[in-house]
Structures are given as structure tokens and as C-alpha cells.
Image (tube, rainbow, N blue to C red):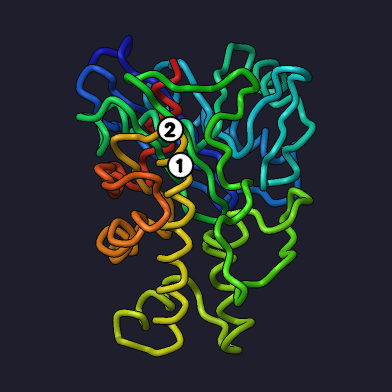
Amino acid sequence: MNKNFVKLGIDLGGTKIEIAALDTNDNKIIYRKRINSPQNNYFNTLDAIQSLIEIAENDLGFNCPVGVGIPGSVSNKTGKVRNANSVWLNDKFIVNDLCQKLNRNIKIENDANCFAVSEAMDGAGSQYSNVFGVILGTGVGSGIVFNKKLVKGSNGISGEWGHNTLPWKSNSEPNQRICWCGKFDCIEKYISGPSVENEHKEVFNEELSMQQIAKKYSEKDKNCMITIDLLINRIARCLATVINIIDPEAIILGGGLSNLDILYQEVPKIWKNWVFSDSVNTKLLKSHHGDSSGVRGAAWLN
């Protein structure tokens, strides 16, 4: 192993923080560690990131370039974090604070962008030029990669599709569902894991986890079939808007909901109902690197 090819990536999630060392010479992860994310405390979050880096570099025996994927993004205007569903990060100077705390330069990027880069570089989207990467987890995020390069946009918010309004709503769907961002009826409030769980509980008075809903769906449970069928329909509508705007060759799903294999069979069957074309060639793919995509993409920042 040549230490000059080793880079550290950190995935700062809502429930966990993961660090991994990527050997970019052969694109293999040679070290990884995961801890629970501190909740509702910015400074504890910084301490946890610092501790993970110090432990990893001590175990490896050398220092490495570090990239961090975070929920939300850093504002071009203020340098502060914005749009993070881990709301204790918002309005904080995380880039400056981490660089000062670690006494080195740290690269920071939106976690969905990291996911998209990882899958486009050497994952499920490696054979495609234009890739839209989606995280369906505790929130909904996405990133756009054209010709192996991340598209950030003039405002640094390319891919913030989870906070568009749910398209083509039916009369039977709830109105005015408020999102943590302050707006109503965001996509994230309908196709994220917690949102699906909450709606299932509201409709059927059953408190089930997403994993339990998926399992009971496979067992032909009537209530869970209704919930998953509605989720399939909503994801198809939402992704149709993406195809209508950027027309990617591949859409790659990550996050907890991406483990629902039925999505890859059923969503492409119906998204044609909303795509403004007589045919749809876009591929819907499951992430190749799974839970590792975030940390891999963060490592690729350097």
C-alpha cells in the first residue's frame, strides 16, 4: 500500500458517522469505523469527527487528506451550512471550524453529491456519462454528475430535488404536510423512510419500521401493500420530473429505501405516464457500493 494514494472520507449522517480510508490506486476501502451521531449538538459533532480522524490515522500510521459529506450544503454567500435536516448544523461555519480544530484543510460537500460522485466514478453509474444519484433515507437528497464531474450549479444547490413539491398530487393525498424546512408538501415528506412510516401509522394505526413494512409487503399484507404501492407511484412521479428536466442516462438509488428491490421492477413501468416523451431509456439502478457510497464519495473530494 502506498500511503500517497490513501484518502479519508467521512459520511456525517443523521444517525451515524462513518469514516473510511480509500486506496485510490485500486479503489478499495482499507479501513472503516462507524459511531452513532451526536444529536442536537454541533460541538459534540465536531468532537466526534475529530476523534474519528485521529483514531483512523493512528490505526493507519499516517495522516491522509480528508473529505466530509454532510447533510445540507455550505452557502456560497455566507460560508455557513444551510438546508441540513440535521438542523443543529445549520447556520454554522463547519468548514472553518473543522479546519481550525484539525489544523489542516478539510474538503466538505453535500452527502448526496458524495454519493453521486462515488457511484458515477466506479459504481453502478460508471458506464454512463450523465448520472442522477438519489439518497432515499431519513431524508431525500440527490446529486448530478455529468461526464464524471459533479454539477454544483451557480447557487451550489444542484440536485436539491427533495424540497420540490410532490408532483401530480391526487385528491386523495394529504395537503399542507409541513416539512422541517418550513415549506409544505416537499417530496421528502412523502418518500423518505420516516415519512412513509408516519403515513402508514396515520392511515392504518400500525406503528411499523420501514423494514417491517417491506417484510410484510413481501408477505402480501394488505395494508403494507397499499403503502408500498403508493410509495412506488410517488417515486415514479418524482423521478419523472427529473427525467423531464435533465434526462439522465441512469438514476441510481441509495439509502435505506433503495433496498426495496420492487422499486427497480415497478417504478420504470409507470414513470412513462409522466415523462414528456414517447419512450424512456433512463435506467433505474441500485447503488453498487451501498452504505459505502457516501464515504467513498467524500474521499474522492481530494
Q: Are marks 1 and 2 in contact (CB under 8 Å)?
A: yes
* Number of residues whose C-alpha sits closer than 10 Å to that of mark 1, classed few (under 14), some (14–19) or many (20 or more): some
Q: Amino acid at mark 1?
A: Val
Using the rendered view, name the quadrant where residue 168 is placed: bottom right
Residue in the image at 67% along x and 21% along y: 95
Taking 191 as reference, is 299 above or below it? Answer: above
Closest to the observer: 90 or 8? 90
Q: Secondary structure at mark 1?
A: helix
Residue 279's x, y, as percent?
Answer: 26, 47
Q: Is residue 45 left or right of residue 106?
A: right
Q: Is residue 66 visible?
A: yes
Residue 299's x, y, as percent?
Answer: 41, 25
Q: Secondary structure at mark 2?
A: helix
Q: Is residue 20 visible?
A: no
> Residue tagged by mark 1?
242
Q: Amino acid at mark 2?
A: Ile
Residue in the image at 77% along x and 30% along y: 92
Taking 123 as reference, is 212 above or below it? Answer: below
Residue 144's x, y, as percent?
Answer: 44, 30
Mark seen at residue 199: none
Residue in the image at 47% along x and 53% along y: 136
Using the rendered view, name the quadrant where residue 226 is placed: bottom left
Q: Is residue 259 left or right of residue 102?
A: left
Q: Is residue 166 left or right of residue 301?
A: right
Residue in the image at 63% along x and 30% along y: 73
Closest to the observer: 237 or 250? 237
> Residue tagged by mark 2?
246
Using the rendered view, name the quadrant where residue 79 is placed: top right
Closest to the observer: 68 or 31? 68
